[in-house]
Image (cartoon, rainbow, N blue to C red):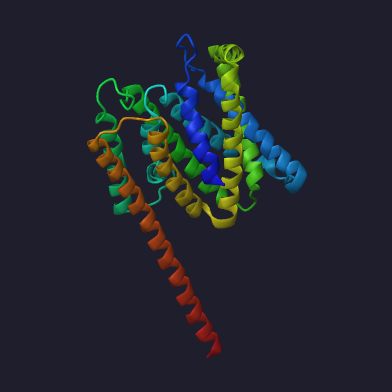
Amino acid sequence: GIWSCFFAYGILQESIFVYKTPTGDKFKQTTMLLIVEHTVSALVALVIMQLFTGTSSNWRQHLKSQGIVACAQCGAKFASNEALKSVSYPIQALAKSSKTLPAMLGCLWSGKAITRLQWAAAFGITLGTAGFSMGGKKGSDIEAKPLGVLLLIVSLLCDGTVSAAQQGMRNQKEKLSPYEQMFMTNVGAAMILLPVAFVSGQLQAGIGFLMENITILDEIAIFALCSAFGQVFIFLTIAWFGPDTNAKITTVRKMATVLISIVWFGHTIGATQWAFVGVVFASVLAEISEKLLTHGKKENGKKENGKKENGKKEK
């Protein structure tokens, strides 16, 4: 479910920002696009709660933590979408293909230790993404502008804040349901973006652009629905299998999306750039392998401790 929704999401996201009108104009109203995305996601979560799960009575005590998540997620999405005006989608996806970088940034808040392999993976991803960006010939569709790279760094900082805040919420005694988290996060993000879009004029300009270019409406509608149902699958995966499993699924998805984007939109990639793509993929796979090995050791340790305790009881 996650792969299907976000494969389509990634292709549509790039398609929306490379769309050109007959006069050569492009869709530039990022805040309006995000308002549509967050509103649709909030409505989907609300419908699911009303029909199936209901709501808890303790949601008010989570307003502060959910507000932090909403602000940070809003910033991450805005920066990554805005970056597409200055970098190609493969560069954006490569930069955000690892959960290590946001997790390391989140450690600045939580104080969690970072392994040597994670440092090495972060360095490999940074080196690979930078090399891939700079390896494109001048004037090609893979060339990255400094503003786009800066926005990707901001997006990663915001992802790290989301990761730290959500980890803190998992340690709370009274927790929100996945759909309540989804609803509150998206409503909060939409409320933040609405006045920004109105004051900046992007709301009015975006509506005007869509009214004049109705053909792009279908792509935006499907884009928003893919985001909404993709979030449903993500929250269900976290609830049923845990955040580590979800991180592995989304990481592999982002890596595959890079290749799909290159083929789908016909991006011209040189041999050196393919080598740097390999560096990023190898770094991400090393990161996943470490998590799998660590998880396996923990499970074996729990089993051995359980056997020892059972042995003591029998004696």
Above or below, 2 relative to 15: below
How many callouts does the rendering have? 0
Q: Seen from this angle, which residue lies furthest left?
A: 272
Q: Give x and y (percent) for residue 300.
A: 44, 71
Above or below, 83 relative to 178: above
Find residue 86 and report its image quarter.
top left
Is 159 on the left-hand or right-hand side of 314? left
Is 85 on the left-hand or right-hand side of 172? left
Q: Seen from this angle, which residue lies furthest top?
A: 23
User: Which residue is more in the foreground, 60 or 101?
Assistant: 101
Q: Give x and y (percent) for residue 155.
A: 43, 32
Above or below, 195 relative to 113: above
Res 114 seen here = no
Is 250 on the left-hand or right-hand side of 179? left
Q: Give x and y (percent) for residue 265.
A: 41, 30
User: Which residue is more in the foreground, 44 or 197?
Assistant: 44
Q: Give x and y (percent) for residue 231.
A: 58, 41
Is 27 on the left-hand or right-hand side of 150? right
Find residue 85 and report its image quarter.
top left
Which residue: 66% across, 42% down? 180
User: Which residue is more in the foreground, 89 or 295?
Assistant: 89
Res 165 seen here = yes
Which residue: 61% across, 28% down? 221
Q: Seen from this angle, which residue lies furthest right?
A: 51
Which residue: 67% across, 39% down? 45
User: Which residue is more in the foreground, 191 or 139?
Assistant: 139
